[in-house]
Image (cartoon, rainbow, N blue to C red):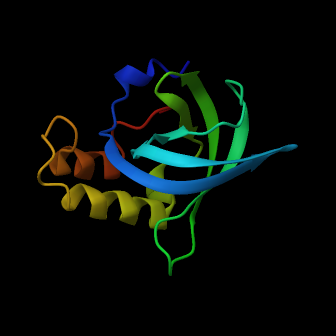
Amino acid sequence: MFGSILDRREHRIPVRLRLSFSGGKVRGEGTVTDISLGGCVINSDTPVSVGDIYYLEIAVGDHEPPIEAAAIVHSVGARGIAFTFLRKAQENQRLLSFIYSRAGSMSSIPSKTVNPSALASMVQGKGFVGE
């Protein structure tokens, strides 16, 4: 349905951001370790199951409100909990701006990880999970 986390078409941007998430009776906290236009991977001790849907609040700065996104658990494994965003990043202006700003400031990362040209193409509606 979603494909392997290793086959994600979006370019992942390594980050270390605090987040909280909630869904149903479950509430948790963790750290976002990478983020892309299609989703993110987090580390958390909160038990979750594939297919669970959560409301994520990702802290991007001390003086900014968190980025909010709904996401479904794609996989749970050694890398962490992989979430797929339920809305395209281009529909969430704050998320899109954050990813674009991080991609532009990551010039020391090899182009295989972050390619601003590919990111711009995805922003125009190409390469999203679930399309």
Percent x, y of residue 28: 71, 47
Q: Is residue 28 above or below residue 64?
A: above
Horizontal side, residue 73 vs residue 38: left or right? right
Which residue is at a point 19% across and 55% down the rendered structure image? 106
**Residue positioned 22% across, 38% down in the render:** 113
Q: Position of residue 79 (x, y in %)?
A: 46, 27
Q: Quadrant of residue 24?
A: top right
Q: Quadrant for residue 8, please give it.
A: top left
Examine the rendered structure and indicate whether residue 75 appears above or below residue 126: above
Q: Is residue 37 toward the left or the right of residue 82 in the image?
A: left
Q: Position of residue 45 (x, y in %)?
A: 66, 36
Q: Could you tell whether 44 is left or right of 39 in the image?
A: right
Quadrant of residue 101 in the image?
bottom left
Question: Is residue 124 visible to the viewer in this orientation of the structure?
Answer: no
List the single residue furthest toward the front: 45
Q: Position of residue 87 (x, y in %)?
A: 56, 48
| In the image, farthest residue toward the bottom | 63
Quarter holding the N terminus is: top right
